[in-house]
Amino acid sequence: MRRPVIAGNWKMFKTQAEARAFVIALKPLVANSSHCDIVIGAPFTALAAAVDAARGSAIGIAAQNMHWEKEGAFTGEISAKMIVEAGCSHVIIGHSERRQFFGETDVTVNKKVKAALDAELVPIVCVGELLAERESGRTEMVLETQFIGGMAGLTAQQFSRIIIAYEPVWAIGTGRTATPEMAAEAHRFLRQVAAAKFSPERAAALRILYGGSVKPDNIKGLMAQVEIDGALVGGASLDANSFASIVNF
Ligand code: PEP
């Protein structure tokens, strides 16, 4: 039985004060939500405030990106150690917005995954196809390439600590959700790729989240699919009531 994960991704939203107020509002709404892991991806500047506000709850805090080096002359970058020191448990790696706008590649995703694991962070690794790729029948090829590239060189033991988020790019922030069946089909395919690369047992234990316009009114249908182990939620994670309804699907 895979334990569900509901993770929020605030992107470039929320100051420290707003992050604190959100977490304080969320805590009582999810106090009895022991059926899943709850994670919030906050901006770097709000990580410590979110961690502080989440104390005494089961809410984990994630960074939305990191650099793979331990330290160095990398202006504007943040290391895994800094994220751990801020109190984070998770880090989102390879989000499509980073791939699209900031030059993230499967090679950099792979370096970041390894550095995150070395620092004891749980990586939430995002993969997903563009609309043109889906429409030209290349979805599986894209997912396989991103998965194999991102997981290159990991031991089975390291792989067991990874969470994958399947996020079709055409569904992110567009209000256009993949149907539960479409998402489940992609998850099934990713699990097959994981079984071939690692083992059927590791693949069966892998948690695969769906992301792309998840809202309180579509989470139930998505979670009804046995292949879907949770959600990575952007827009609908910005409001505590809306995020809590998704957590309490
Ligand atoms: C995301 O940011 O990962 C995401 C899925 O966004 P949204 O839920 O707004 O589509």
Image: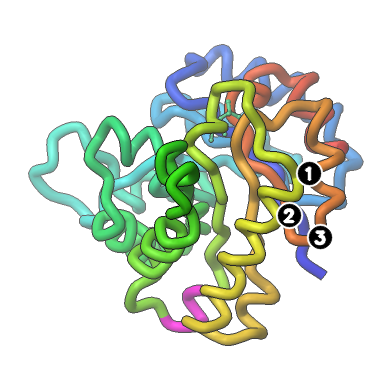
Question: Which stretch did the figure color magenta?
Answer: 155-159
Q: Which residue is mark 2?
A: 228
Q: Earlier in the sequence, mark 2 or mark 1?
A: 1
Rendered location of residue 35, percent (x, y): 86, 52
The rendered magenta stretch, by its main secondary structure, is classed as: helix
The 10 Å Cα crowd at callout 2, few under 14, some 14 to 19, many 20 or more, is: many
Rendered location of residue 190, percent (x, y): 56, 65
Mark 1–mark 3 Cα distance, whole angstroms, equals 9 Å
Amino acid, disc 2: Ile
Marker disc for residue 226: 3
Q: Is residue 187 magenta?
A: no
Mark 3–mark 2 Cα distance, whole angstroms, equals 6 Å
The 10 Å Cα crowd at callout 3, few under 14, some 14 to 19, many 20 or more, is: few
Mark 2–mark 1 Cα distance, whole angstroms, equals 7 Å
Q: Are marks 3 and 2 in contact (CB under 8 Å)?
A: yes
Image quadrant holding the N terminus, namely bottom right
The 10 Å Cα crowd at callout 1, few under 14, some 14 to 19, many 20 or more, is: many
Q: Residue at x 78, y 44 (%)?
A: 222
Q: Which residue is mark 1?
A: 222
User: Disc 2 on helix, strand or loop?
Assistant: loop
Amino acid, disc 3: Val
Q: Residue at x 22, y 40 (%)?
A: 103
- Which image quarter has ligand 1? top right
